Image (cartoon, rainbow, N blue to C red):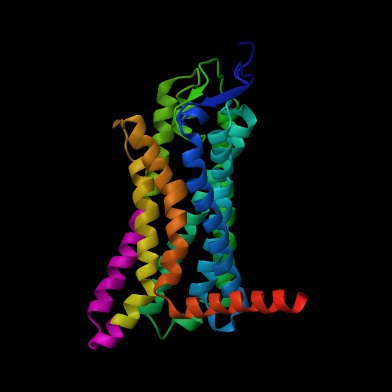
Amino acid sequence: MESGNLSAVAEFIFTAFPQLQEGGLLYFFPLFFIYTFIVIGNLMIFFAVRLDTRLHNPMYNFISIFSFLEIWYTTATIPKMLSNLISNQKTISFIGCLLQMYFFHSLGNTEGALLTVMAVDRYIAICSPLHYPAIMTARLCAQLSAGSCIFGFLILLPEIVWISTLPFCGPNQIHQIFCDFAPVLNLACTDASVILVQDVIHALAILITGLIISLSYIRIIVVILGIPSAEGRKKAFSTCAAHIAVFLLFFGSVALMYLRFSVTYTPFWDTTIALTFSVLAPFFNPIIYSLRNEDMKDAIKKVLCSQKVFSVSSG
């Protein structure tokens, strides 16, 4: 190697995908259906919140932004997965791999930050309801939303730039379904202790974020249990039940993947866990946010009805 910022590896090969003749097409159609559902479902939630004035409040504003992010979060990986399932050459360029890692994890970090904001929002709404309108103003909501996005996309930039300077001298096989830090860094011709430091930083970020959200919801549940009337408890819990479910699904699968430390999984479990937080969690989120929320259901019906009216009038 002449220089550390030059790489002998021009592309990476994904080894976790079955060949087309080995049943790759059988996985293609379910994954394509899931991706289509994720995009349409989250778009419906996003437009339902934007178009229905009854949902113009901080909680639904954060949900709509989260749904919008979910579309791009899955778009960072699933289209390439679909391509690999029907292609004989399951490769990705070195630059393409870095970009996939950057956008996938930046969007994931943004979602994590937004989930923290949503937990704090529910904490204030339930624990300090009288002060809530004065605290959670439209301006603060906009600042928190923008801050989550800026944080998510800036925090990873130095790390991606650093990885781009590492020497990759082979092999070039990634044992995963998308470009991720651990599989890629394991291929770098560099000191393993640097990779360990990076793992610890990621673990601390996940633990701190998860702890803040967990403490917020624990406090919320304690306050809800103290409400005298059963109807009051039910109403208060219904406003944050979906948030708790999404948090457990998202952070649970992320923790399994990135808080393993020295624990190693079989290739099957590695792929299963990766699919959980990259595909299945985004698939269930639109269902969770709309299944038991009558206001959201009504707003989505309005969007669908307006589409039908538009189709009839244009026809």
Q: Nearer the viewer, residue 31 or 107?
A: 31
Q: Is residue 224 magenta?
A: yes
Figure quadrant of residue 148? bottom right
Image quadrant for the N terminus? top right
User: Does residue 174 appear in the picture of this structure?
Assistant: yes
Picture residue at 27% right of the left edge, 77% below the top: 223
Picture residue at 48% right of the left edge, 47% below the top: 30
Q: Residue furthest right?
A: 314
Range of the magenta residues?
Answer: 210-233
| Count of numbered circles on the image | 0
Q: Position of residue 295 (x, y in %)?
A: 48, 80
Q: Is residue 170 magenta?
A: no
Q: Position of residue 39 (x, y in %)?
A: 57, 57
Q: Residue furthest top?
A: 1
| Image height of 214 relative to 201, above or below | below
User: Does residue 152 appear in the picture of this structure?
Assistant: no
| Dominant secondary structure of the residues highlighted in magenta in the image | helix
| Image height of 172 relative to 208, above or below | above
Q: Nearer the viewer, residue 144 or 16?
A: 16
Image quadrant for the C terminus? bottom right
Figure quadrant of residue 248? bottom left
